[in-house]
Image (cartoon, rainbow, N blue to C red):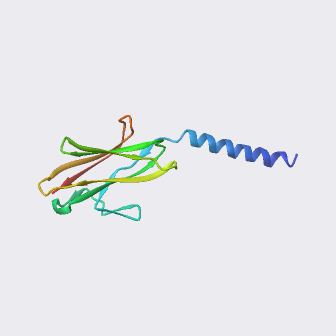
Amino acid sequence: MRLALPCLALLLVATTGAVAQESQEVSATAVVCTQIVDNSCEGASSRFSAAVGKLFGFSQVAGVPDRLIHVWFYGDKELGRIAMHAAKANRWRCWSNVTVNKSMTGKWRLEARTPDGKVLSSFSFTVQ
C-alpha cells in the first residue's frame, strides 16, 4: 500500500501537467523599441524621433505552434508583413524591424498576428 500512494501521486502530477499544457492559450506581446540587445527589447517607447532610422518590433510568444506574423502600419497603410517561425519551444521571442524615413512622421502601429490573421497584440506609437 505504501508503494501505491507515491505512484498515484506521480500519476496525478503527470496528468495535471498534460492538461495544463493542452489548455494553454495562444498569446503574444508586441512592443516597439530602438534596439535588440541580448534577445531583449531596449529603448521601448510610444514616441520616437523621426531621426531614429530603424525601429524594432519585439514579441514574446506562447502557444503559437508554427509562426507569428508582424504587420507594420504607417497611418492606415500596411507597410509590410514579416513571418517569424517558431522556435522548438512553447515560449519564444522574435523581432522584426522597419526603416523609418525622416518624412514618415505620425501615427504607426505594429500588430502580432497568427498565420490565419487573428490579432494577438497591437502596439500603437508615434514618430515625430
Q: Position of residue 102 (x, y in %)?
A: 13, 58
Residue located farthest toward the bottom when viewing the structure as drawn: 37
Q: Residue at x 35, y 35 (%)?
A: 117
Q: Is residue 15 left or right of residue 84?
A: right
Q: Is residue 59 left or right of residue 123?
A: right
Give the quarter of the figure containing the C terminus.
bottom left
Q: x, y percentage for residue 17?
A: 63, 45
Q: Where residue 79 appears, x then y in whole percent?
A: 22, 44
Which residue: 46% across, 52% down? 92
Quadrant location, the N terminus: top right
Q: Residue at x 39, y 37 (%)?
A: 115
In the rendered image, the residue lying farthest to the top is: 116
Considering every residue shown, the one lying at the far right of the view is 1
Frontmost residue, 71 versus 15: 71
Q: Position of residue 84 (x, y in %)?
A: 39, 47
Q: Is residue 58 left or right of residue 5?
A: left
Seen as rendered, the residue at the extreme left is 103
